[in-house]
Structures are given as structure tokens and as C-alpha cells.
Image (cartoon, grey):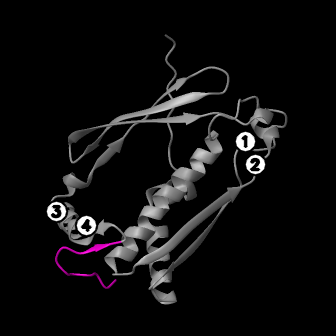
Amino acid sequence: MNVVTQKNLRVNGIDVNYVMDTIDAIASEPAKGIVAFRVKSAWQGQTKSEHVVESYMIGGETVPRRFAIKCDEPLELCGENTAANPQELLMSALNACMMVGYVAGCAMRGITIDSLLLETQGELDLRGFLGIDEKVKPGYDALQVKVTIRGNGTPAQYREVHEAVLKTSPNYFNLSKPISVEAALVIA
């Protein structure tokens, strides 16, 4: 990767020097690179829920934040269609995580992006979710992600960034490789 090394350089809105300083700091002190995220989710009636982010941890320090994400199901799936459903949020989280990788990866190579579009889709069978057929899994067999990018990069540069994103995107990793999820039940 040819990293841009000019002072005070911003590409695609990314402060390239800040990213390089962050990489150097984490490389020399790995504990600074440990981050922990958490979300609290509360039922809001029917199929609606609200998911609240209050803080995250980076390098052992808690950083306050406050965001709320609404979720609902379409009318046809017993909801009121007031917000994206869990599957759409899952795909949005994948797209958003990968998008950061494309934007930063291009910025670090001095590539200016004019447009970037990620389109993700997948098909699942409700017979699995509804418990109608035990042979039908409740989730996806596969997701398809189409990335359309335009800017001043060459096809070879975009392929390099694409491969880097597939290697380093946390949400791409989390969805494309088996990870452990532990669910504890608390009866209050």
C-alpha cells in the first residue's frame, strides 16, 4: 500500500495523519487498540424495540455517547412498519462497517472517492423463523454485497482496497466467519 504522507492532509473527509498517528500509537502500545462496544435493547410494544448506545471503551477509557436506534417489522410480519427491521439493520451494519474501510482505505492511498454505494441483499425462509420446519434454518445461506465505487483511483487500486476491506472489516468478519455468541437468560 502506498500511504500518503503529506502534512495536514484530508482525503474523503479522513485526516490521514491522524489515522497514521493512531496506527503508530496502537502498534507501539497494543492495549490502546482494544475497543468494547455495547448496546442496550428494550421492547417498545408489538414488534418495536429501541436500542441505545451510551458509551464505548477504547484503550481502557470509557467515552460517553448517546444514540438510539429504532427497529420494527413490516406490516406483513406483524409490525407497524415504523423503522427498519432486524435484517435490514444487520445489513446496514455490514454496509456501514465496510464503507468505513473503503473510505479510509482510499484516503490512505490518496484516492478521492466521488461516489460509493454498497447494496446488500439476502433471502431467508420464514419457515425456519416460525418453527414450521426444523430442517429449514432461520437465517441466511448467503448475503450478496455489491460495491460500486467511482473516483480517481485505478481498477488495480480499487481491487487492493476491496481485498483490504474483506480482510479487515469487523462486521464482514463477524458475518462471514463463525463467531461465538453467548446468551444468558435473567428472569427478573
**Alpha carbon distance from label 2 to label 4:** 39 Å
Q: Which residue is mark 2?
A: 124
Foreground mark, 2 or 1, reads 2
Q: Which residue is mark 3?
A: 25
* Vertical comparison of 33 with 105: above or below: above
Residue 142: in sight, yes or no? no
Q: Residue at x 37, y 69 (%)?
A: 104
Q: Is residue 8 magenta?
A: yes
How many C-alpha atoms fall within 10 Å of the one at disc 4: few (<14), some, or many (≥20)? some
**Alpha carbon distance from label 4 to label 3:** 10 Å
**Alpha carbon distance from label 3 to label 2:** 43 Å
How many C-alpha atoms fall within 10 Å of the one at disc 1: few (<14), some, or many (≥20)? some
Amino acid type assigned to the residue bearing label 2 in the image: Leu
What secondary structure prevails in the magenta region? loop
Foreground mark, 4 or 1, reads 4
Q: Residue at x 48, y 62 (%)?
A: 98
Q: Which residue is mark 1?
A: 138
Dot placed on the residue nearer the N-terminal end, 1 or 3: 3
State yes or no: discs 3 and 2 in contact (Cβ < 8 Å).
no
Q: Which residues are magenta?
A: 1-11
Q: Which residue is mark 4?
A: 19
Foreground mark, 1 or 3, reads 3
Locate the N terminus and report the quarter of the image it occupies: bottom left
Dot placed on the residue nearer the N-terminal end, 4 or 3: 4
